[in-house]
Amino acid sequence: MFKFKSNRKEEAEASLAIPKHVGIIMDGNGRWARKRMQPRVMGHKAGMEALQKVAKEASGMGIKVLTVYAFSTENWSRPEKEVKFIMSLPVIFYENYVPELHANNVKIQMIGNHNRLPQSTLEALQRAEEKTRHNTGLILNFALDYGGRLEITDAVRMIAQEVLEAKVELADIDEHLIEDYLLTRNLSVELRNPDLIIRTSGELRLSNFLPWQSAYSELYFTDELWPDFDGQSLRKAVEAYSKRQRRFGGV
């Protein structure tokens, strides 16, 4: 069983600006497997192991929220065998990793759609959420069957319905109200929007990941394939983030 590092900053970290919320687009599992002449599913398995390492480091660094893009609304178009394996991973994750995460005060949450998930997948996620509900450490937030455009569309529908029912006035609709209808509403206001978004595998796009919430996020791209990304890789990304000056549209 691994042990998380203390949140006490090491001397080398004293000057780092630690982001409160980090989002990760975990890309490159298939290419990692292909380079090793293995089935794509082995890349997804290795990717799950990489997530454990990164969660360990994130907790030790004092990051509050780690939102990981596990499966997008567009990923359903992948081969059925691959999708079926990906949907089995939360069950494996619950059995192999959640006990350690729970023992180290990690809280597991999920954003995304529930309707299309297999029952076994949904039940594993719900058990993980329930088991860790009262934990107060790192929030490991899975974006599963998640799509940013759908999230915003659903929020607009809900707000429109509330207007029709006279529960919301048109004059009340502003950015803050909209954020209360997005899937990240389960996070506290100061933690809803990622400070830093990391994408692995060398691709330079967000792929429908948190489009509203990432409006002022710092972006970090690396050629590393996700299964090769580890705690040291996360630290390198945070060091790069720490050197940037965030202006939020100001001077």
Image (spheres, rainbow, N blue to C red):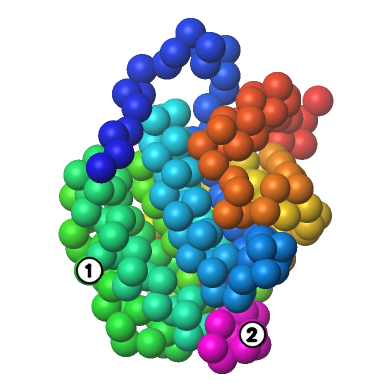
- Above or below residue 53? Residue 113 is below
Residue drawn at 38 percent across, 87 percent down: 118
Q: Position of residue 226 (x, y in %)?
A: 61, 54
Q: Quadrant of the N terminus?
A: top left
Which of label 1 and label 2 is nearer to you? 2
Residue drawn at 32 percent across, 87 percent down: 119
Q: Which residue lies under the disc numbered 1?
A: 127
Q: Looking at the image, can residue 41 be seen?
A: yes
Q: Looking at the image, can residue 183 be seen?
A: no
Q: Position of residue 93 (x, y in %)?
A: 34, 64
Q: Which residue lies under the disc numbered 2?
A: 78
Question: Which of the 4 image quadrants contains residue 165?
Answer: bottom left
The amino acid on which the numbered mark 1 sits, given as a three-letter code, is Arg
What span is in magenta? 71-82
Q: Does residue 237 show up magenta in the picture?
A: no
For disc 2, the neighbor class at 10 Å (few under 14, some 14 to 19, many from 20) is few
- Above or below residue 107? Residue 45 is below
The amino acid on which the numbered mark 2 sits, given as a three-letter code, is Arg
Q: Work out whether mark 1 precedes mark 2 in sequence or the reverse, and give the earlier one.
A: 2
Judge left or right: residue 118 versus residue 129.
Answer: right
Q: Does residue 76 show up magenta in the picture?
A: yes
Question: Which of the 4 image quadrants contains residue 243?
Answer: top right
